[in-house]
Amino acid sequence: MERDSDESRCKGVCDMERHETEVVRDESSGMVREESHVTTSGAGAPVAADDTQVVSKAAPARRAIEVIYLVFGIIDALLLIRMLLKLMGASTAAPFANFIYDVSGFLLAPFKGLLPAMASGKSVFEPSVLIAILVYSLLAFALAKIIAITLSRSVMVSRRSSSRDYRPRVD
């Protein structure tokens, strides 16, 4: 009974809307946008109606945080490679080992002499490398949180467009 009243009330004038929402991420710019498409159809509606609303959200701190984690990730990786090369007894005559020792030596300067190195044959374990990795990781986390707190605003850009091709309404 309720269907009959809806049909008599609409009498060819009711519209049907179809909503489609899609979240799109642009990898190059880091922008995330939500696209909504609303299509209206029915006897009283346009033949082809497309109503698009684009909403873009961006967090300005996101890129800075990614750079911080990248830089400190590289530092931790260099220190970890140094620790493995020392444990395996890699020769300083090898260019790669020498490069890693030189670069990581600069990064380990604040931690030199903190704990004694333990040697067994050619293998050397430097506990100060583990402490350096821990400190650099904590420093990266703290910097990322400071950036997130100070720049924690979301920017939203909204644009709405509509294109319609109308046909006469049928009564």
Image (tube, grey):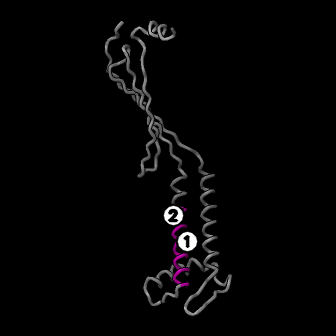
Span of residues in magenta = 68-87
- The percent position of residue 34, horizontal first and vertical second, equals 46, 38
| Residue holding disc 2 | 70
For the residues marked 2 and 1, what is the alpha-carbon distance in whole angstroms? Answer: 10 Å
| Dot 1: element | helix
Q: Residue furthest front?
A: 1
- The percent position of residue 140, horizontal first and vertical second, equals 60, 64
Q: Residues within 10 Å of mark 2 (few under 14, many from 20)?
A: few
Q: Nearer the viewer, residue 59 or 41?
A: 41
Q: Residue at x 68, y 83 (%)?
A: 115
* Mark nearer the N terminus (2 vs 1): 2
Is 79 magenta? The answer is yes
Q: Nearer the viewer, residue 158 or 82?
A: 82
Q: Residue furthest bottom?
A: 121
Q: Residue at x 37, y 27 (%)?
A: 50
| Dot 2: element | helix
Residue 54 marker: none
| Kind of residue at disc 1 | Asp
| Residue holding disc 1 | 76
Is 92 above or below relative to 149? below
Q: Nearer the viewer, residue 60 or 87?
A: 87
